[in-house]
Amino acid sequence: MPIAHSRKRNSPRFVRSAISLCVMLSISSAYGEAYFDPGLLQPVDGAPEIGDLKSVIANEKKEGTYHVYVDVNGKKFSTEDIQFSLKDDALVPCLPMAMYAKIGIDPSAADVHINPEKDERSCVLLTEAVPVAQSSFDFLTKKLSLSFPQTTLHALLKDEIPVALWDDGIPALLVGYQASGSQTLQSQDESSGSSDNYVNLKNGINLGAWRLRNLSTFTQSSDTGTEWDNTSTYVERAIPAIKGELVMGDAYTTGDLFDSIRLRGVQISSDTDMIPGSINGFAPVVRGIAKSNATVIIRQNNNIIYQTNVAPGPFAINDLAPVSNGGILDITVKEADGSETHFSQSFASMPILQRKGALKYALSVGKYSEADLDDSEPEVLQAVIAYGLPYNLTLLSGLQKSNAYQSYDLGLGLDLGFLGAMSLDMAKEKSTLAMNAEKREGTVTHLKYQNHLDKTNSDINISLDKYSKNYTSFADNYAKADDNQQVKKQQLSLSLNQAITDTQSIFVSLNKTDYQNSASSKMYQVGINSPLWMLNASVTFGLNQNQDEEGKVTRDKQLLFNFSLPLSVFDHTSTTNATTMITNDLKGNSNQTVGFSGNIMHSPAFTYNTQMGYNVQKHEDDTKNASAGATYKGQYGEAQLGYNQDDQQKQFTYGMTGQLILHRHGLTAGQYSDGAIALVSAPGASHVGISNNLGVYTDWRGYTIVPDVTPYNTNTVQIDPDSVGQNMSFENISAEVIPTKDAVVLAKFPVNIGRKVLFTLNYKGDVIPFGTQAYLVGSDRMFFIGDRGELFISGAADEGEILVDISDSHQCKAGYKLPKIEGKLPITMMTLSCGDE
């Protein structure tokens, strides 16, 4: 049906063409969501007013399934294929049950009428499922905006992501590899040398929520031969209901209270990655009283870290995100009349502390697979909990039990406010040594302390372990006797980091171990980091002191100077960094090293490093050494080559890492990943870069790997617009993925590959009316005719056919064959006649 539009015949043609082209470019999806600016239809140069294109096209709305962009309560949600039904002259979405769950609709809410047991693929009209909800479908831009009252949604924290949105990913086979090796030649006799090669493989299968992983290593040495080692094999999956994960097979127990040991069995433990950041880890409850409807503002170091509105009366803020290990919180209560109340609250934290009511747990059952005796694998049970109590206390408790060993641990974690945070626990064990059946009984006490002082910007960490004479750890109980092994009596670790200015700091550390036989070892370090002009400088002094059981003391001192200077201070285009390191043992021996590193051909993906050193030795001849290396980080992985030489030998080194994924779309190679992966799918779009991921480009088929995306969080994967070819038109250049642990999630980027063409269509000699719908034959893409019959298509094939809806019951067809591209004009122009179907 022809659509009339107001336009004078004598209006300038260039005005009509400009408006038409703007309209068509606005309609076409190129980068991001399509958006039509009504301002483009404002009168130009005195031309009469043009009607609203949306109202023109409104009469063309048809029931059916459309690929739409979905917003929920003003936030971008997803891209979906949604079925629409025409109700009261408006298109109403029929949402799948699974989508209601993803949005977070509460089936028990009074204004919600859906059956949660219904098939998740079946759809229910929005007007029937949630009558109080509102929807707005922009037919032109295919944008569906949904609005739900908070009373119809599950109560969520601001940063909480509904479990229904967590993506377990696609089925996939994975192989991650890390390889390295060296070839060493003696300088005096190059015929004699040695070689060493190492390969670490992380193999896996993903199927739904289940993950199968196998870790294997291959070592080859000219000295020891060749060896394959199956390090571990396990199956794991997330259990969202208990914010934890299940691991079956080879696993290491948590090291919160007991030393971590390797088991072959079953383990269920907390996964803190599942917990929203605002309540993950310990943070104090901030309490106060508001006299009116007030705003509470919380600052740390003069930075606002939290702000919320509260009603009159007492308030308690228990979702404050931990931003540091402690300090002073400045709280402001701003009343409705503008008056303010100020108070402060000190707090301190450490990893073991839990919020009130929070539970961190781990339960492990299996066989201890590292016992040294007679290939025995004793069965073991280990359970550990940390539970948040009132008054900033945390209960710590644990059990470790086997046939010849049992240990019970009990303790408390405390937030002492401005005094810091500490935990104190004691473990009592009874054991029968597997080696000689000797019965033992002992205790170990663990004390940990942490504090951050805002006023001085100081960080303090102290750890003290005290062992009774007969205490035996689980691993030692099943180890072979070692006459040279010393039994610990006490172990102390202390570190202090003190900021002097924004760019200067000093640190002090002490590690001391005392043994039951009066022997001891100590290591002291003190250092300062300070820039000097554009020079980064650090000075470190270290002292290792060992005392044997007879009281004999040996000391090893080391003084180290380190300087670094970016050469960009002399040439802003330079990427080279110069370094110098000097070490001296204060006994006449020293080493001086000078090095350079930077980018090759200004490419951050291709880097180099060189180094030259000179050793001065008091009782031996001085020696020299040199090294050079290069690293490339590209779409198929990372590779390193190196060369080292000193007075005694020459050495060639290599290394490479990468990832292979076999999935339903084929085989994709990329950079090594140790966790969840986003698999970019842009079929046909080769060598397209991914923003903020160095060296990551799509392969010849349009697929690539984005490694190590954050599990249980929203990750934005974005196409680099500068890498997009002229023959590519993306419907969107960013996609959001929320993977579960170790998942391979698909990041889809629909793309049209082909030419950009501006057609001018006529039918029986007349211009096809403005707003008429048109289609590419063989495609589900829909277009609208612009003023004077113009039709803009991106991603057009070299030849094809166009269907045009002349009326509700009549179509015409126009075939085309594009000429060869001449020059650099990105758009081809062509006039077509549309014939009857």
Image: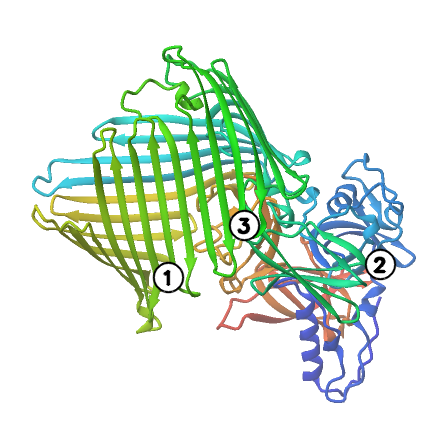
Residue 706 at least partly seen: no
Rendered image quadrant of residue 308: bottom right
Using the image, determine if residue 598 lies above or below residue 407. Answer: below
* Residue topped by disc 1: 603
* Residue 427 x %, y %: 50, 27
Residue 242 placement, left or right of 618 = right
Circle nearer the N terminus (2, 1)? 1
- Per the image, the residue denoted by label 2 is 809
List the single residue furthest toward the right: 88
Query: Mark 2 to mark 3: distance in Å?
Result: 81 Å
> SS of the residue at dot 1?
strand
> Are circles 2 and 1 on residues that touch, CB within 8 Å?
no
Alpha-carbon span between mark 2 and mark 1: 59 Å
Q: Of marks 1 and 3, which one's residue comes earlier in the chain?
A: 3
For the residue carrying disc 1, how many other residues have a C-alpha within 10 Å: few (<14), some (14-19), or many (20+)?
Answer: few
Element under disc 3:
helix
Amino acid under disc 3: Leu
Q: Residue 390 is drawn in which quadrant?
A: top right
Residue closest to the eye, 242 or 787: 242
Q: Which mark is residue 771?
A: none
Quadrant for the C terminus, please: bottom right
The residue identified by callout 3 is 419
Quarter of the figure with residue 568 = bottom left
